[in-house]
Image (spheres, grey):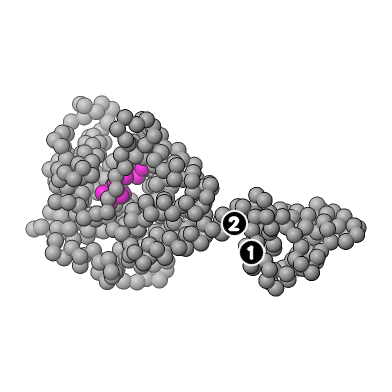
Amino acid sequence: MARPALRKVDRPEEGGPRLAHLDRDRRLVEAAQADPARFEALYRKYLAQVYSYAFYELRDHHEAEDATERTFLAALTNLGRFEERARPADGEGASTFRVWLFQIARNAVAERRRRRYRRPEAPLEAAAAVAAPIDLEADTALRDDAAAAWRAVGRLPGDRRRALTLRFVDEMSTAEIAGVLGRSEGAVRVLIHRALRSVARDLDDTSR
Amino acid sequence: MTGAYPGRDSHEVDALITDRYLEALLAAHARGADHAPAGAEPAPSIRLAADRLARDLPRLHPSFRFEEALAARLAEVAARMGLSAAAGAEGLVVPLPGQGPPRGADLAADLDDASEDSRAGIGRPLLIGGALTSAALSIAGAAYVAWRLNRPPSSAMVRAARAIARTRPV
């Protein structure tokens, strides 16, 4: 079954230079640093990824939009300080710009969460249920297993949930996730493994 | 279990196997295939959970309206950044027409700007060569220039520059 996702996976060109893909955003970043108007290419490229991350974290359409907006505005205004530093060890398609962008997104989401705690609102799942027009649970009502997966991920504690979202939704490598979460690659691998074990148990309970 | 991965404990080995499986699984999905190629596989429960998440967790896109509104806002910010960069590279501070401060005052204002941060978020009053903003031509802009010229000097360098400016004929 095709995955219902907006996906774009960049791959190195056949026979192209081995290192060219390691900093796949370098040209776009340099262009935007020279002319901020050219930031739009980076924005269009990563909008869905950043928004998805925010939505999976906040489970509210409006809050996800707010966090997305803050992320891109902060990225644009601070782009001059960014330096591409992807290494071969970071894997194919690694982009430190993406890691940097998601570090900003993580902070923006955390800020939204803090505001939510100061001003308590409906629980996460209730918020998601009324989050029109993108209402994942309603959209997937006919697919109970998909809704169960969505809920199982939502029940995970902080970094486990974030790691799974970055891995499965944003398709980041372990090295990139380590950069975003500020952990070692080994720690991220264990985090994801344990998160999957929790999800497996959760899904198993749901299906009984 | 750890034979193929010496120096690692069983948790790390399990995590590594899961990681390799996910790499293969997500790469297979990117190619449009449903399953990861056969290889070292994690425990069946982990594999099933991974398969389901890879299949069922969608990437979301915000509304077109939001996307375009944010694009417009970013373009606006980018334009301002471009203007100030160009102004910083080429612009000069010049007196407002009819409000001509003595020569040298611009130098004093520059030094004053450099000696204090832009805490109020107010840009340089008028820039030519890089950018000319409508705000700089406003009454508020004129009042700001006047205030900057008359307020007490804040550093020795500024005081010196202003003193020189005052001694020179206009």
> Please, what is the dominant secondary structure of the magenta stretch?
helix
Q: Which residues are magenta?
A: A166-178
| Residue ID at (17%, 47%) | B51
Quadrant housing the N terminus of chain B? top left
Residue A151 placement, left or right of B90: left
Q: Earlier in the sequence, mark 1 or mark 2?
A: 2
Q: Determine whether label 1 and label 2 are within 8 Å by CB.
A: yes
- Occupied quadrant, residue A145: bottom left
Under mark 2, the amino acid is Leu
The vertical placement of A45 against B10, above or below, is below
x then y, percent, for residue A80: 53, 48
Q: B40 and A96: which one is in front?
A: A96
Determine if the magenta segment contains residue A170.
yes
Dot 1 crowding, Cα within 10 Å, few <14, some 14–19, many 20+: few
Determine if the magenta segment contains residue A95.
no
The vertical placement of B38 against A149, above or below, is above
| Residue ID at (30%, 63%) | A59
- Occupied quadrant, residue B129: bottom right
Residue A101 placement, left or right of B136: left
Under mark 1, the amino acid is Thr
The local secondary structure at tag 1 comes to loop
Q: B46 and B53: which one is in front?
A: B53
x then y, percent, for residue A34: 53, 47
**Which chain does the residue under circle 1 lie in?**
B
x then y, percent, for residue A65: 37, 64
x then y, percent, for residue B96: 75, 66
Q: Mark number for residue B83? A: 2
Label 1, label 2: how far apart the Cα atoms are: 9 Å
Q: B125 and A176: which one is in front?
A: B125
Please name the residue that numbered disc 1 is placed on: B133
